Image (cartoon, helix red, strand yellow):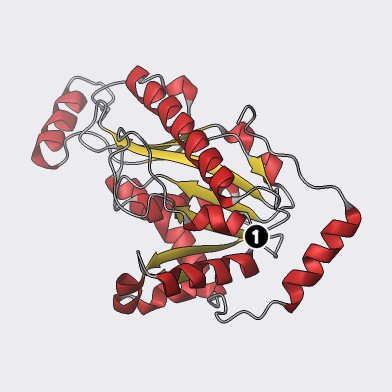
């Protein structure tokens, strides 16, 4: 597709019919009920936890976010690490504080950690037709709400960010083909070791695509795959360059080696009348 921005249907009659059709659809599965108290705690805890274990969280592509204002939002990510849901929480708190956040999660994980359901997570099972229908059912209801945000790790499995060709699960493409009005934004994620013992969490938001219910799932799949791959390639280039000016640093964590070695370095600096800097480099 030549452009990453898809046209929104402007036919008022057709739009009204679509909303009427959605309102009478019989949904088998209800979205999870979010606990406001638990969600506030989690969104506050995520940056604290990340700052304890990562050197930084850096973001580029912020200029692509305003296009989603006032629209139901889908953010779909690649899935390189265990860290991805925590990073999504950091981003949600920073960039989308007024939205209600939801995400599919592996059904077995949800059975182990049932409180995740109070954080807007709902269980799905890879390869299950019933689970596919559940994702579509819940997703369609969520994307009727202008303040909702649905976060999807679109590969459906852990995968190295350099893996090509990029392969996405088909569920998201089928969901978007059902919906009239929304914004979908790719988010590339990777974790790079630069000059410190802990990793840099790097994120790039790609160009938004706006709702078009006339696109078939296959067309959506092509667009989703192409735009996420491009965004991942751009992030990889920025990561290789190690140029911090290409990013906004939204979180800074620990630096240095830690323990006895940094205590000794700090002691020597004080003896010399110098200021101790734990960082090994300037990044």
| Quarter of the N terminus within the rendering | top right
Residue drawn at the location 48% of the way across and 60% of the way down: 43
Determine the residue positioned at 37% across, 70% down.
128
- Occupied quadrant, residue 210: top right
77 above or below 178?
Answer: above
Q: Position of residue 231 (x, y in %)?
A: 48, 32
Is residue 248 among the parts visible in the rendering?
A: no
Residue 182 relative to residue 84: left or right: right
Against 281, is 158 above or below? Answer: below
x then y, percent, for residue 126? 35, 64
Which x, y percent locates residue 85?
39, 55
Give the side of residue 12 with respect to residue 18, left or right.
Answer: right
Quarter-wise, where is residue 22 in the image? bottom right
Residue 136 horizontal side relative to residue 197, left or right: right
The residue that mark 1 highlights is: 178
Who's the residue at 13% across and 42% down the image? Answer: 259
Frontmost residue, 63 versus 12: 12
């Amino acid at each position: 597709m030549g452009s990453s921005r898809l046209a929104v249907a402007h036919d008022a009659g057709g739009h009204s019919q679509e909303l009427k059709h959605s309102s009478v659809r019989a949904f088998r599965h209800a979205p999870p009920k979010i606990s406001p108290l638990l969600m506030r705690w989690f969104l506050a805890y995520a940056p604290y936890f990340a700052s304890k274990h990562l050197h930084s969280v850096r973001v580029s592509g912020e200029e692509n976010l305003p296009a989603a204002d006032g629209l139901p939002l889908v953010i779909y990510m690649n899935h390189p690490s265990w860290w991805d849901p925590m990073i999504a929480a950091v981003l949600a708190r920073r960039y989308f504080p007024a939205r209600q956040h939801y995400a599919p999660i592996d059904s077995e994980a949800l059975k182990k950690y049932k409180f995740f359901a109070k954080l807007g997570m709902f269980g799905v099972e890879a390869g299950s037709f019933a689970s596919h229908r559940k994702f579509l059912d819940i997703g369609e209801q969520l994307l009727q709400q202008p303040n909702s945000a649905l976060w999807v790790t679109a590969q459906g499995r852990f995968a190295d960010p350099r893996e090509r060709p990029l392969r996405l699960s088909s569920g998201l493409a089928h969901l978007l083909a059902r919906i009239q009005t929304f914004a979908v934004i790719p988010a590339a994620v990777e974790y790079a070791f630069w000059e410190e013992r802990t990793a840099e969490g790097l994120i790039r938001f790609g160009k938004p695509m706006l709702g078009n219910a006339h696109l078939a799932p296959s067309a959506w799949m092509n667009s989703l795959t192409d735009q996420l791959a491009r965004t991942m390639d751009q992030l990889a280039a920025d990561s290789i360059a190690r140029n911090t000016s290409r990013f906004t640093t939204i979180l800074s964590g620990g630096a240095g080696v830690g323990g006895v070695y940094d205590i000794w370095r700090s002691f020597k600096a004080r003896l010399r009348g110098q200021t101790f800097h734990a960082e090994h480099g300037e990044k």
